[in-house]
């Protein structure tokens, strides 16, 4: 539609979309490694804390909880610092993209005024071109603004693919010939330590295959 108003409107619109797309590509290319490293470091630090807290009673009994949390906190702050540095770079490029959008809209109005003065376009084309150009560049600007979400989604997808690829294939376990079909329990009693009354007393049940 911009080309129908005047070819110059159309080419300026194409240039604006290309400029915003290049800024998005630049944000991805310059922060991809830093963002991936910071995300991996954050996940590794969180996994280390979870591993140390599996034996929570032992950790608390030995008085090691403050030391473990303090060491984790320092590592977590370093990981977040790397992530913040990458995001600061992205926010800078997003600010440049917003400025480029404003510059693009101003340039469209200036070109329209020049075309009207030169009697090569109607005065109403300035307003129409500005509105249509805004709609044309909005999807590209939105992609640049939400680049961080796309980057995190791509990192999560790559981690998920590696996890699935590293999982060993399942082996079919055949039932023993002498085993009864289904699940059988007879006189089952469950009493946790430190509790006088059992949670389960003399439970007997039989579940056939496919039953729950």
Image (cartoon, grey):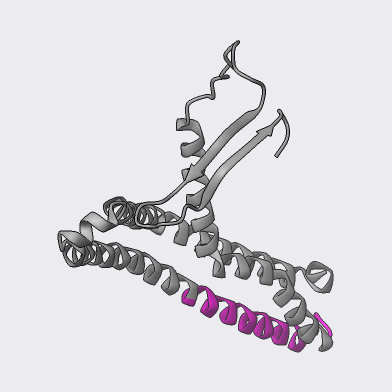
Q: Residue at x 73, y 68 (%)?
A: 10
Residue 117 covered by magenta stretch? yes
Whole-percent x, y for residue 183 in the image:
62, 30
Q: Is residue 29 above or below residue 77?
A: above
Instruction: Please identify the quadrant where the C terminus is shown.
Output: top right
Q: Residue at x 35, y 64 (%)?
A: 83
Whole-percent x, y for residue 86 in the image:
36, 64
Question: For this rendering, which residue is in front, 26 or 184?
Answer: 184
Residue 119 covered by magenta stretch? yes
Quarter holding residue 106: bottom right
Whole-percent x, y for residue 58 in the image:
22, 55
Q: Is residue 70 above or below residue 154?
A: below
Whole-percent x, y for residue 126 in the image:
76, 85
Instruction: Please identify the quadrant where the N terminus is shown.
Output: bottom right
Q: Residue at x 41, y 51 (%)?
A: 192
Region in magenta: 95-122
Q: In this view, does 145 lie to the left or right of 53?
A: right
Most common secondary structure along the magenta stretch: helix
Q: In this view, does 120 lie to the left or right of 162?
A: right
Q: In this view, does 196 lie above or below 66?
A: above
Q: Is residue 68 left or right of residue 92?
A: left
């Amino acid at each position: 539609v911009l080309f129908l108003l005047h070819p110059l409107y159309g080419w300026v619109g194409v240039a604006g979309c290309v400029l915003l797309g290049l800024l998005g590509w630049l944000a991805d290319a310059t922060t991809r490694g830093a963002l991936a490293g910071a995300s991996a470091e954050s996940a590794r630090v969180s996994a280390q804390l979870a591993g140390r807290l599996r034996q929570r009673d032992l950790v608390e009994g030995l008085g090691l909880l403050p030391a473990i949390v303090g060491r984790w906190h320092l590592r977590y702050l370093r990981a977040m610092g790397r992530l913040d540095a990458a995001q600061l770079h992205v926010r800078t490029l997003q600010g440049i993209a917003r400025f480029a959008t404003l510059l693009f809209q101003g340039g469209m109005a200036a070109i329209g005024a020049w075309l009207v003065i030169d009697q090569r376009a109607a005065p109403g084309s300035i307003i129409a071109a500005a509105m249509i150009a805004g709609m044309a560049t909005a999807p590209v600007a939105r992609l640049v603004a939400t680049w961080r979400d796309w980057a995190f989604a791509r990192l999560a997808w790559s981690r998920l693919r590696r996890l699935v690829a590293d999982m060993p294939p399942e082996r079919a376990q055949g039932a023993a010939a002498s085993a009864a079909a289904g699940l059988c329990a007879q006189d089952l009693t469950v009493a946790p330590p430190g509790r006088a009354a059992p949670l389960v007393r003399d439970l007997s049940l039989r579940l056939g295959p496919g039953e729950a």
